[in-house]
Image (cartoon, rainbow, N blue to C red):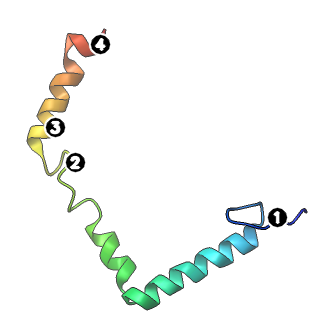
Amino acid sequence: MKIIKGRGWYGDTNSHKRTGSLGGKATARTHGKDFYSRIGSTGGKISGGNFKNNRALARRAGKIGGSVKAKN
C-alpha cells in the first residue's frame, strides 16, 4: 500500500481507528468522563425545530405536504 502524507483517510483503517480513539479520549479528559452521556441525553430535546416540540411547525408542514401546489 502506498503511504500518503497529509490529512484525511487514505485506506489505513487501523490508523484511522487509533486516531479517532485518541481524539475521543482527549475530549473526555478535557470535558470530564460523563461528557458523552450528557450530550447524548440532551440530543433532540433542546431543538425546537422538531415536530415533537413544535406542534405548529408540524401543522404547517402537513399543510404544505398535503397541498395541491406541492404535488404539482
Label 3 with label 1: CB-CB less than 8 Å: no
For the residues marked 4 and 1, what is the alpha-carbon distance in whole angstroms?
50 Å
What residue is shown with label 1?
4
Depth check, front residue: 11 or 50: 11
Q: Are marks 3 and 2 in contact (CB under 8 Å)?
A: no
Q: Residue at x 36, y 86 (%)?
A: 34
Residue that lies at the very extreme toward the right in this rendered image: 1
Q: Quadrant of the N terminus?
A: bottom right
Could you tell me the amino acid type at mark 3? Ala
Residue type at mark 2 is Asn
Q: Secondary structure at mark 2?
A: loop
- Name the N-terminal-most of marks 4 and 1: 1
Q: Secondary structure at mark 1?
A: loop
User: Marks 1 and 4: in contact by CB < 8 Å?
Assistant: no
Q: Residues within 10 Å of mark 2 (few under 14, many from 20)?
A: few
For mark 4, what is the residue? 71
Instruction: Tell me if residue 48 comes above or below residue 34 in the rendering.
Output: above
Residue at the spot 86% in from the left edge and 66% down from the top edge: 3
Farthest residue toward the front?
6
Residue 12 vs 30, above or below: the answer is above
Q: Residue 8, percent across and down? A: 67, 62
Mark sitting on residue 58: 3
